[in-house]
Amino acid sequence: MKKEKPLLPRMAATATLAPLLAPWLTVQAQPSAERADRRPNIILFMVDDMGWQDTSVPFGPERTPLNERYETPNMERLASEGMLFTQAYAAPISSPSRCSLMTGSNAARHRVTNWTLHRDQSTDLDDAEVSTPDWNYNGISQVSGTGHTFVGRTFVDLLRASGYHTIHVGKAHWGAIDTPGEQPEHFGFEVNIGGHAAGGPATYLSEQRYGHDAQGHATTPMHTPHLERYWDTGTFLTEALTQEALHALDKARRYGQPFYLYLSHYAVHIPIDRDPRYYQKYLDRGLSAKEAAYASLVEGMDKSLGDILAWLDRTGEARNTIVLFMSDNGGYATGSYWRDEPLYTQNAPLRSGKGSLLEGGIREPMIVRWPGHVAARSRCDRYVMIEDFFPTLLEMGGVRHYKVPQTVDGKSFLPLLLQRGDPSRHRALIWNYPNVWGNEGPGISLNCAIRRDQWKLIYNYKTREKELYDIEYDLGEAHNLAAEHPDVVRRLSRELGRTLRRMDAQRPIEKASGKPCPWPDE
């Protein structure tokens, strides 16, 4: 095996891990609620727009000033009790990541390559030189019949069919308004609290009824539904969703079956409202008002994680529950799309942020805790992709044989968790973002990219520029090595182009000629 480069530590687990038990065997943990099905409970804790550095947990080779800024003690606890992934990737925008999570298909294949909202309406902004492709702006669906939609069966529905009780709390963002995919119930969730077509909250404030007027009518598509009991109570949105998740867990425990909880917070997405529980202390430390508000959002999210972990401890479910932590794209650290919103965070040492195919836009904080299977304080420096959750969660839930209409591109990262193999070795990761998001900054819009081992190639459809980085030695992507390694550029360009065509991916159209922009290998 090739000797590892020193940038990121290798997996450092020292304990011998117990083998993955088949679902028909009794696990060591004994939950207090008796049930015949001993398969593990699964909780996926998803954060919105959380950057790699928006935490006191260092996911890089060393602590940074940003790690000192934020207080996330429950993330620290989770990392101390499980495995921290230093190279977990997603798409640069919410909907592509979340649709890949649910279907296991790469965004180049499912073609939901930008964020979704209104039926039959693209969210792309205009570009003077190219037109964006006619992508699947209606999102994903489990049934055919809606145009501009990718049809696939979700892992949630497969878990439900196998005996799991399935709970959704928070943000969904898989399908446009008035399409089958707008509601989580369509995808196999038996419980849905707060999820619908919108990809962000109107407000986190109960005084504004989370986007409803005095008569209870939604004032914006970005309203958060199902939380009427918290209106005008002073309950911050993050806390309201947490309380609902805890109520749903109490109910689930009485059912006597394993549960899957998807707690998908709207935090830390804009608007950057102040969480009054934590805001003042960050002001007192000298942060600007906007920075302090963002830090309060981060800490409120972490408090939610702590409440979930405390529930698992209190009920005796911790030993038989897998907890996974992930974000859907990089932190909002590129030029402000909302012109009155000054920037309030960054992803350094990573470059750029949300909307970009540079590391700051796609590298995410990820932690997995599975008592008795995943060694505490272990660290994985191999890369994984958001679509990998699909086969992994099914395997964790004992669902090993299934039939779905879509092609599953994801690979189970269970061998990494159990330290039994390396499915990422020599694997190519693919991104396709032929869209115009509307933000400003390096690496944003009209790009595709490939990562294989240490090398990463980014190709701009519009300018035809190619950037090549050695990620293991140049985490901040400061040195474009394309001119120095033309052989690597040719090889990766050929693989990227062939893979995109094989996935039936889309590309922009040149307005002047009416022809598609060249593939990276043309």
Image (cartoon, rainbow, N blue to C red):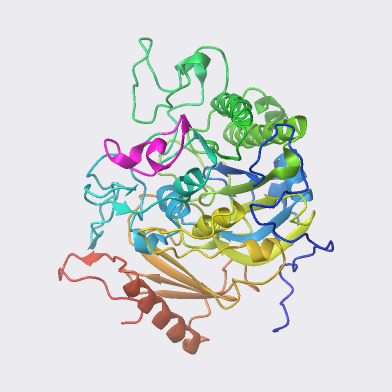
The residue nearer to you, when weighing 4 against 17, is 17
Q: In which quarter of the image is residue 497?
A: bottom left
Asked if 251 appears above or below 383 in the picture, the reply is above
Question: Measured from the top left, where is residue 491 in percent x and y?
Answer: 45, 85
Q: Is 41 above or below relative to 497?
A: above
Residue 33, position in %: x, y?
Answer: 70, 31
Residue 12 in view here: yes
**Above-or-below relation of 407 to 260:** below
**Quarter occupied by the N terminus:** bottom right
Looking at the picture, how far across and down is residue 276, in whole percent?
A: 63, 22
Please provide percent x and percent y for residue 370.
71, 50
Please name the residue shown 62% across and 47% down the image.
325
Q: Give the range drawn in magenta.
A: 174-195
**Toward which corner of the image does residue 279 lie, by quadrant?**
top right
* Residue 223 on the magenta segment: no
Q: Quadrant of the C terminus?
A: bottom left
Rendered residue at 45%/17% (across/down): 209
Would residue 175 be counted in the magenta stretch?
Answer: yes
Which of the two residues, 418 or 88, is positioned nearer the viewer here?
418
Which residue does the image show at 29% across and 49% down from the upper left?
137
- Relative placement, left or right, of 348 versus 343 is right
Location of residue 113 with respect to 507 vertically, above or below: above
Question: In terms of image quadrants, where is residue 21?
Answer: bottom right
The residue nearer to you, when weighing 326 against 414, is 414
